Amino acid sequence: MNIKSQKDFFSGLMFLVVGGAFAWGATSYSIGTGARMGPGYFPLLLGVLLAILGSITMFYSLVIETSNGDKVGSFAWRPIAFILGSNLAFGILLGGLPSIKLPSMGLIVAIYALTFIASKAGSEFKLRDVLLLATVLAVGSYLAFIVLLKLQMPVWPTFIAG
Amino acid sequence: MDLIANLSTGFGVAFTPINLLYAFVGCMLGTLIGVLPGIGPVATIAMLLPATYALPPVSALIMLAGIYYGAQYGGSTTAILVNLPGESSSVVTTLDGYQMARKGRAGPALAAAGLGSFFAGSVGTLILAAFAPPLTELAFKFGPAEYFSLMILGLIGAVVLASGSLIKAIAMIVLGLLMGLIGTDVNSGVARFSFDIPELTDGVGFVTIAMGVFGYGEIISNLSRPEDEREVFTAKVEGLFPTAQDFKRMLPAVLRGTTLGSVLGVLPGGGALLAAFAAYTIEKKTKLQPGEVPFGQGNIRGVAAPESANNAGAQTSFIPLLTLGIPPNAVMALMVGAMTIHNIQPGPQVMTSNPELFWGLIASMWIGNLMLVILNLPLIGMWIKLLSVPYRFLFPAIVLFCAIGVYSTNNNTFDIWMVAGFGFIGYLFLKLGCEPAPLLLGFILGPMMEENLRRALLLSRGDWSVFVTRPLSGGLLAAALLLLVIVLLPSVKSKREEAFVDD
């Protein structure tokens, strides 16, 4: 059997799996009855519904003809890795990682790291521009978030600020 | 005259210098971010939400409303100048607006959008002020069964208007509802689907989802496309003001658009989107006056009507939110989340328990609209400059604002890990052609739906027929069913697909 619409097939599969997982997870809580709903009642209902919707989507994707096969296409791993990576680096530097005793490096360091890593996701990378951007963002964020909005977050590395 | 008394209470609150300042800052920031291509109002509001954390609730809501209008207006600016609709409801604006810009008439197009929106917004605000109290009365008659049915209607309404596959949109809602259930169950105290992670027992933060899916997901998808030649009209936008002739043509279009928008905006679902489409269709059906440019080639009515409709709809879509506490679309869902952060549970009780907040917000909506006109018409040159900033400078900044925003919600790095996950999921959704907006709506409504279902079934002793035997509830469900049937009718179905392919 041919998959007529890749996008629909895989989204259907996703709904089926996630719905099934939620429904299965819900059975570990007490279900109860309609009049006395337990914590598992509504999730079970929805999980089953989602799985059914997923199956229908998959079924359609196998029988309804599309003009171009609705290909999912290749994943843009480079932006995924750098955007999400920059975000993770930001979190690690800002909050530190207690599990490996990495102290917090503070907002400013984190901003520079984020800007550098994120910029790698684009097609162009000019060091001078990125440095400039990072500096503008660091100063701007300091003024906006710390001075003006008084958000509570570490600004400098703990070994400097104490 | 209750209306006048109420409105004057509201203006008394909104007209304090400090709140005016917040409205101004909100509009300014909203436009600033909203103008950036590829960022819709949902991402804008999510990103700027942390900026309101430190404020008292009234000021925070006023600022948020400003951000909302600014984001909407910024969206139409990009639609006209870059042919990139910031959100679905400004899709129609691109049709004639971009053509006007290409003919060197970007100024009048932007002015038409701005003035039309202001007029529509003012009318919408008055309607909101007039209809909110009686609707609130009605809301107190609602039992849990009615609320549950109303939410069903709202969710169905939202997907009916979404583009693309209906069944996938419904599945996205259900997925959102399920995600909304993650965390501690209020009734039994059981932590559901939290995998023993302490942070998850509080549930997934909606800011996390909104930023991950709408912010990161879209950035990744934007970066994966080869940089297309974006034609931005930065060179010259001169002759800002429409001519007398333009005004004569605009006026009836604005009036028609406003009427249509005000009515359709109240409906659950993407009222503003439907209103913009309908307003454009109506304008297209009216006869062209001699010497008028045909539609699709830069007719000013094709900008004024959908923009007015869209803004009037945006305004009246606050009605179900403020009176019933039910968000009709993803942006309003975000507003619910914002209100909850400031310890306000939206719903009929807000007006009685917190009249200053309620009427202050309504008054500030009008002020926000006024500010947009004052702010945007002279500042158009600045927004255009912003449009010419290359994307490689923009996206790291957006990533940073999202990261700071997510962190500051709970001062917790756990949320930063979560947002990365949702960023990937958001990209996956885009790749698979699943629209994410219904997910957010479902996410906000999940716990509310469960609670109302639980109460309704408790009262009926487990009898599901209560949803159809109670007249109000039955009527709402019938309306939802009717909507579904209409969309599935073969003739409407093909039209619907056509309308979304058109753009």
Image (cartoon, coloured by chain):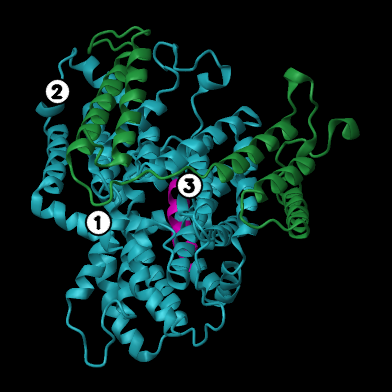
Q: Is residue B366 magenta?
A: yes
Q: CA distance from mark 2 to mark 1?
A: 29 Å
Q: Amino acid at mark 1?
A: Leu
Percent coordinates x, y for residue B91 in the rendering? 35, 63
Q: Which residue is mark 1?
A: B264
Report whether B414 appears left or right of A34.
right
Report whether B326 appears left or right of B219.
left
Percent coordinates x, y for residue B37 in the rendering? 51, 61
Q: Which residue is mark 2?
A: B466
Query: Can residue B417 be spotted in the picture?
Result: yes
Q: Nearer the viewer, mark 3 or mark 2?
A: 2
Q: CA distance from mark 3 to mark 1?
A: 28 Å
Badge 2 marks a residue whose secondary structure is helix
Percent coordinates x, y for residue B162 in the rendering? 29, 49
User: Dot 2 surroundings within 10 Å: few (below 14), some, or many (20 or more)?
Assistant: some
Q: Amino acid at mark 2?
A: Val
The stretch of residues the image draws in magenta is B358-370
Q: Which chain is cyan?
A: B
The residue closer to the viewer here, B438 or B265, is B438
- Above or below, B42 against B31 in this view is above
Q: Earlier in the sequence, mark 3 or mark 2?
A: 3
Q: Chain of mark 3?
A: B
Q: Name the tint of chain A in the rendering.
A: green
Residue A5 badge: none
